[in-house]
Structures are given as C-alpha cells and as structure tokens.
Image (cartoon, grey):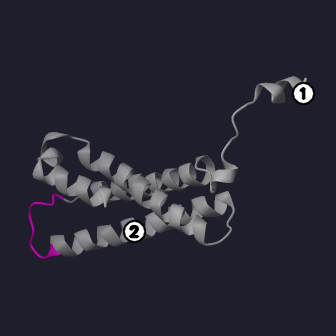
Amino acid sequence: MAPFFLDIGGNMLGLYESVELFDDILHLANWLLLAAAFIMILRGSRPTTRLGLVAAGGGFGSFLIVLWELLEYVVAKTGTTRLFLTYEDTVVDLALSTGGAVVGAAVVAFLVPRRPSERPRPANVTDSVTAV
C-alpha cells in the first residue's frame, strides 16, 4: 500500500508541482517496493534461483509500468489537462520504474535471508580459536 499512499500524499501536499524530481523519485521508489514485495511472496512459494528472482521482479515491474503508462495515456485522451504528459516523461518513467523493480528484486533475492536458518550466525570466540 505504501506506493499508493506516497503517490496520493504527494498529490495532496502538492509535491509533484513544488519538487522538480518528485515524480521520478517516486517511480524509482514505488517500483522498488512493489517488486520487493512481489519477490518476497514469490520466493516463498517455490525454490527459484536468485537471478531468476531478479528477472521475475524486473519483468513484473516492467509489465506494471507499461500498464500504468497505458492507463495514463487513456486518461489523457479523455481530455484531462492536468497530467502534463510528454513522450520524454513516459520514457523516463518506464526506465526508472523498471530499474527500481530490478533493484528491489535484487535486494530481496541477495540480501534478505529466506529462512531464519539462513541468517548469518554471530561469530563465536571459540569458532575463531579453533579455526586458527
């Protein structure tokens, strides 16, 4: 829900108009969060390689942003003038959102342990002595 609250909150606070890069920051951050959540769900359902998870997260994010931009286009064609959509904005949104999805998926795939048993064990003083 965080991406939707951030988007709505940004609109309510006028951040899209007052902060030049707000839209770009949100595209990166929101798709990072969406892909991370998707990969957390996906990796619990069946065994998958880490690179497979990153690819799935990137694909999921790419699909969602294309769908999002298509819906924006439909809304713009209905006569809405407040969107200020340009070709450049659409391409940047596609790139940032896909990049955010890949980063979010990679963070979960490579940095978040799958199970408590996979978490790194704290170093024990006796372990370092016996290793020497």
Cα–Cα gap, marks 1 and 2: 52 Å
Residue type at mark 1 is Thr
Q: Relative to 11, is 46 on the left or the right?
A: right
Viewer can see residue 87:
no
Check disc 1 and report the residue beneath it.
130
Q: N-terminal of the two: label 1 or label 2?
A: 2
Front residue of this view, candidates 117 and 88: 117
Check disc 2 and report the residue beneath it.
64
The magenta-colored residue range is 77-84
Mark 1 is surrounded, within 10 Å at the Cα level, by few (under 14), some (14 to 19) or many (20 or more) other residues, namely: few
Residue 46 pos. (x, y %): 64, 72
Q: Is residue 82 one of those drawn in magenta?
A: yes
Q: Secondary structure at mark 2?
A: helix
Q: Secondary structure at mark 1?
A: helix
Q: Relative to 80, is 2 on the left or the right?
A: right
Q: Relative to 25, is 72 on the left or the right?
A: left
Where 127 sits versus 84, above or below? above
Residue located at (33% from left, 53% from top): 27
Rendering quarter of residue 67 = bottom left
Residue located at (24% from left, 57% from top): 5
Q: Is residue 115 one of those drawn in magenta?
A: no
Q: Nearer the viewer, mark 1 or mark 2?
A: 1
Residue 60 pos. (x, y %): 48, 68
Residue located at (54% from left, 49% from top): 107
Residue located at (34% from left, 56% from top): 93
Q: Relative to 36, is 92 on the left or the right?
A: left
